Amino acid sequence: MFAVTKTIRPPLMLVEQIFRHLHMPPKLACEFLATFSRMEYALKSTKYAIGDDKKVDPAWDRFANDIHEAFEGIAEPDLLEAKNYLLSHPPRKQTLAGHKITFIDQAIDAKQRTSQQLLLMVRTVRNNLFHGGKYLPDGEQEEGRNNLLVKHSLTVLLACSKLDHEVRSSFEH
């Protein structure tokens, strides 16, 4: 048996260094990741779960299409700003060119509804942030872009979380 005598915590200096490379406030990154996680749980714990006895995933596209009309009807300035920014400056997808990580523009599928496109972009932002896609050398960053992508993605997630009664209940409790 092993006895645990104290909690192991990374030194504050290390935490600050890690967040420095995200090029955004640590609080915003944490809030976005926590909200995204909560939203995935809310989808999977309601009628928006797909999978089998081996795995379960959230049915993001089905959810996006079900809430589309309500989503398009929201005229709040923050959400309109978020939609406009994400649609005109979509997140980029991480790729590997040779042995170098690069980004390519995310294509917008005109056949998809706006709600579906935006929630795909939110997932791309989450993937880039969570899987290390935002740890590029300082010279390769567009000033403030990461901050705006995360901020606007958070706004979209929070708006969507309120548009289905079951999802809202699961998200809030």
Image (cartoon, rainbow, N blue to C red):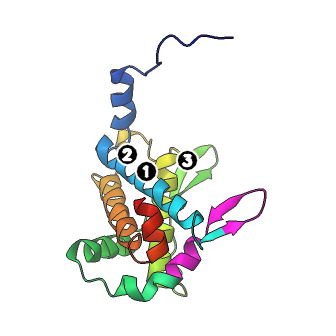
How packed mark 2 is, by other alpha carbons closer than 10 Å (few <14, some 14-19, many 20 or more), is few
- Residue corresponding to mark 3: 101
User: Depth check: 143 or 65 in front?
Assistant: 65
Decide: is 9 above or below 123. Answer: above
- Residue corresponding to mark 1: 33
User: Mark 2–mark 3 contact, CB under 8 Å?
Assistant: no
Q: CA distance from mark 3 to mark 1?
A: 23 Å
Residue 57 shown in magenta? yes
How packed mark 3 is, by other alpha carbons closer than 10 Å (few <14, some 14-19, many 20 or more), is few
Decide: is 151 above or below 5. Answer: below
- Tell whether 69 sits left or right of 46: left
Q: Position of residue 161 (x, y in %)?
A: 41, 69
Callout 3 secondary element: strand
Q: CA distance from mark 2 to mark 3?
A: 24 Å
Callout 2 secondary element: helix
Nearest to N terminus: mark 3 or mark 1 = 1
Q: Position of residue 105 (x, y in %)?
A: 49, 66
Residue 14 appears in which quarter of the rendering? Answer: top left
Task: State which mark lies toward you, 2 or 3.
Answer: 2
Q: Residue at x 43, y 50 (%)?
A: 33
Residue 141 shown in magenta? no
Q: Amino acid at mark 3?
A: Ile
Q: Amino acid at mark 2?
A: Cys
The magenta segment = 50-65
Q: Which mark is residue 128?
A: none
Decide: is 127 above or below 169. Answer: above
Q: Position of residue 37 (x, y in %)?
A: 49, 54
Q: Residue at x 48, y 70 (%)?
A: 167
Q: Quadrant of the N terminus?
A: top right
Q: Which mark is residue 30?
A: 2
User: Mark 2–mark 1 contact, CB under 8 Å?
Assistant: yes
